[in-house]
Image (cartoon, grey):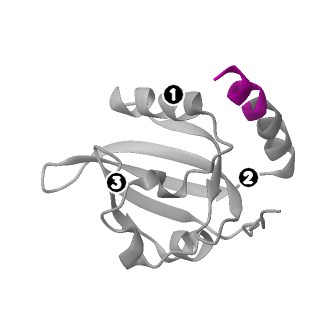
Amino acid sequence: MEKETILDEYTFLVSETDEKGIIKFANNDFCKIAGFSLEELIGKPHNLVRHKDMPKVAFKDLWDTVKKGNIWTGYVKNATKDGGYYWVFATVYPFESCDGTNGYISCRKKASDEEIKIHENLYKQLRNKE
């Protein structure tokens, strides 16, 4: 059985990626919860932490939204390096950095137990349709 990591109320995960989803920055909370060092994350695709239970349509919606320049929010089950998982409420912002390149900032906080239950059921239904 997979081990769940439960975020506390003060944990705030932040990462930055380029336009293709390659990690350029991750804060200490993100590294700690995901179980990776910063060096292991930089230059890797953000889907390194994608959990197998997440339906493809959820990430299609995310990418379709942010590529249009809009902000995406949603509930995400991510994988940890050691094979466990954690749930977050995520907000992804498109932005242009000071060097003129475009990318995305993702900010994540603890998801409520109620929302996790709702989204576990929803994502299971969506995966069954894939």
Res 1 → quadrant: bottom right
Determine whether label 2 and label 1 are within 8 Å by CB: no
Q: From which residue to which does the magenta span run?
A: 123-130
Query: Is the residue marked by circle 1 packed among few (<14), some (14-19), or many (20+) residues within 10 Å?
Result: few
For marks 3 and 2, the one nearer the N-term is: 3
Viewer-nearest of discs 3 and 2: 3
Res 63 → quadrant: top left
Viewer-nearest of discs 2 and 1: 1
CA gap between label 3 and label 2 equals 22 Å
Taking 107 as reference, is 51 left or right? right
SS assignment at label 2? loop
Q: Which residue does the image show at 77% across and 33% down from the upper left?
A: 124
Q: Which residue does the image show at 77% across and 26% down from the upper left?
A: 125
Q: Which mark is residue 7?
A: none
How many numbered callouts? 3
- Which amino acid lies under the numbered mark 2 shown in the image of this protein? Ala
Task: From the top left corner, tell me how far across and down residue 127 is, in percent.
Answer: 69, 30
Q: Quadrant of the C terminus?
A: top right
Task: From the top left corner, tell me how far across and down residue 62 is, in percent.
Answer: 49, 34
Q: Mark 1 sits on what residue?
A: 61
Taking 89 as reference, is 119 left or right? right
SS assignment at label 3? strand
SS assignment at label 1? helix
Q: Residue furthest left?
A: 99
Front one among 62 and 107:
62
For marks 2 and 1, the one nearer the N-term is: 1
Q: Main secondary structure of the magenta part?
A: helix
- Which amino acid lies under the numbered mark 3 shown in the image of this protein? Thr
Q: Mark 2 sits on what residue?
A: 111
- Which amino acid lies under the numbered mark 1 shown in the image of this protein? Asp
Tell whether position 128 is magenta: yes
